């Protein structure tokens, strides 16, 4: 009986009910879009960071990250690499041999990081060919190298010039070689632009005398949200003697910067929820003021205050549920649109982003958890505010309420 009375009473004044539902729907839509943009922006930022060089995950010989010397390298195990590649969610596993060397041209000498890699696998993870500003990509057959534009400027070299690399090879041997510059790379990160040298893995092993050795296995993932699960799976496959590190563990300063920015956005979302709460509360106050005479009359003719309060709570529950579902329905196409056609920055702000290698876009993330969490949060807010009519009804004086 109470359910039927509540439903009929809800549509006795459809304009008032629709206004309240609309306020809930707008609040849900705003919260979902804000949450989707927040997640999409940071996912895109992390994707840009890891595509510079590191990948989402790396496997090293235990202790390598603290020393980063060739003596901490490990033998390439084709069977292990194949098993790692078969882990669900792994897009590519990139074997690398990395060392530090001096790049010399005439009287000019600069320190650099030499990375030996398999060109096609590197393409899948860091999109290295897209960073070419001149020349051609590694073909995996010759002794050519790719160098960062900043390093090229310091050495005053260009495409087809020759660079001498000098360093310490495996187990204290001398590493030396002359290499033709195949292409120049433009990195957003200045530290990479001024120091990176790429060569194919076979050439790197010949240069260092580290036959069949690797310093790291870098991973590209299909979905960054699977990082923790994949890290555990990689640890099981690689076994003891290896360290498995995420990009955040390898680059804590960038990870902390992102966490600080995310905390700032959480403050903004908190402010958004405060605005939503005040908006919903004002709607409830308006409804109570409009229905004061109605409440007084119902109590005067014998309706118990507890029954009236229950009816009002159920009315608020219906309004909140309908408004929440409507807000989710409206949010879905909007989030999908922002995912397919993200907000694109222009002008000097866009130039600043692109200078550091980041895409100047604000995409949205289509994640069911965001829809559910934001909708539930707004729903809880609406339900808590909807308890106000109980207090209002308990205090109402029917004689005073029916006075015009």
Image (tube, helix red, strand yellow):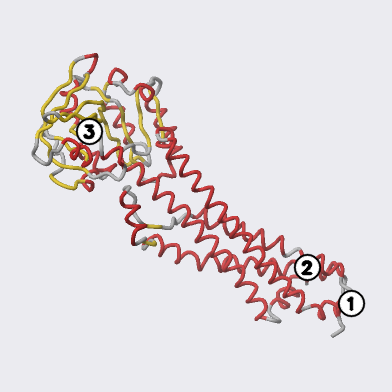
- C-alpha gap between disc 1 and disc 3: 83 Å
- Horizontally, residue 273 falls left or right of residue 285, namely left
Image quarter (top left, top right, bottom left or bottom right) of the C terminus:
bottom right
Q: Earlier in the sequence, mark 2 or mark 1?
A: 2
Residue occupied by mark 1: 398
The alpha-carbon separation of the residues under discs 2 and 3 comes to 68 Å
Badge 2 density bin: few <14, some 14–19, many ≥20, Cα 10 Å: many
Q: Work out whether residue 226 or residue 166 is closer to the camera in this orientation and state it.
A: 166
- Would you say the residues marked 1 and 3 are in contact, meaning their CB atoms lie under 8 Å apart? no
The residue pinned by badge 2 equals: 389
Q: Are marks 2 and 1 in contact (CB under 8 Å)?
A: no
Neighbour tally class for label 1: few under 14, some 14-19, many 20 plus, Cα within 10 Å: some
Left or right of 394? Residue 110 is: left
Q: Position of residue 148 (x, y in %)?
A: 22, 39
Residue 244 against residue 25 in the figure, above or below: above
Q: Mark 1: which secondary structure? A: helix
Q: Is residue 231 above or below residue 31?
A: above
Residue ranking furthest to the bottom: 404
Q: Is residue 175 left or right of residue 91?
A: left
Q: Residue placed at 61% from the left, 70% from the top?
A: 23
Which residue is nearer to you in this view: 183 or 316?
Answer: 183
The dot on residue 117 is: 3
Label 2–label 3 contact, CB within 8 A: no
Q: Position of residue 379 (x, y in %)?
A: 64, 61
Name the disc covering residue 26, or none.
none
Q: Residue at x 43, y 33 (%)?
A: 249
Q: Where residue 212 sits in the image (x, y, percent)? A: 21, 22
The picture quadrant where one finds residue 339 is bottom left
Q: As drawn, is 68 to the left or to the right of 202?
A: right
Image quadrant where one finds the N terminus: bottom right
User: Residue at the spot x=67%, y=63% of the render?
Assistant: 382
């Amino acid at each position: 009986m109470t359910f039927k009375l509540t439903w009929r009473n809800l549509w006795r004044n459809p304009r008032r009910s629709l206004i309240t539902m609309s306020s809930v729907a707008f609040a849900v839509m705003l919260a979902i879009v804000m949450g989707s943009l927040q997640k999409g922006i940071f996912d895109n930022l992390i994707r840009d960071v890891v595509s510079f060089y590191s990948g989402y995950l790396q496997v090293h010989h235990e202790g390598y990250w603290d020393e980063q010397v060739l003596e901490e390298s490990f033998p390439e195990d084709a069977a292990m690499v194949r098993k790692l590649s078969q882990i669900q969610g792994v897009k590519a596993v990139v074997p690398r041999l990395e060392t530090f060397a001096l790049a010399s041209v005439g009287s000019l000498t600069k320190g650099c990081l030499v990375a030996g890699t398999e060109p096609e696998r590197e393409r899948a993870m860091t999109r290295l060919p897209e960073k070419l500003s001149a020349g051609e990509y590694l073909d995996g057959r010759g002794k050519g190298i790719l160098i960062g534009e900043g390093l090229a400027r310091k050495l005053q070299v260009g495409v087809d010039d020759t660079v001498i690399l000098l360093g310490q090879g495996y187990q204290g041997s001398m590493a030396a070689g002359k290499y033709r510059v195949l292409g120049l790379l433009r990195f957003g990160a200045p530290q990479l632009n001024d120091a990176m040298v790429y060569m194919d893995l076979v050439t790197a092993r010949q240069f260092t005398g580290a036959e069949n050795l690797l310093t790291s296995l870098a991973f590209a993932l299909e979905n960054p949200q699977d990082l923790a699960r994949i890290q555990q799976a990689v640890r099981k496959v690689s076994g003891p003697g290896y360290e498995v590190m995420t990009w955040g563990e390898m680059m804590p300063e960038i990870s902390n910067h992102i966490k600080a920015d995310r905390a700032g956005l959480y403050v903004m979302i908190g402010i958004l929820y405060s605005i939503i709460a005040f908006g919903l509360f004002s709607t409830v106050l308006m409804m109570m003021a409009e229905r004061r005479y109605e409440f007084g009359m119902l109590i005067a003719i014998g309706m118990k205050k507890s029954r009236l309060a229950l009816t009002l709570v159920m009315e608020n529950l219906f309004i909140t549920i309908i408004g929440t579902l409507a807000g989710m329905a409206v949010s879905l196409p909007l989030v999908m649109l922002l995912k397919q056609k993200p907000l694109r920055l222009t002008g000097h702000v866009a130039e600043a982003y692109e200078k550091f290698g980041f895409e100047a876009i604000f995409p949205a993330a289509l994640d069911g958890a965001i829809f559910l969490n934001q909708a539930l949060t707004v729903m809880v807010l609406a339900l808590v505010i909807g308890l106000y009519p109980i207090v209002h009804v308990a205090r109402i004086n029917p004689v005073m309420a029916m006075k015009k």
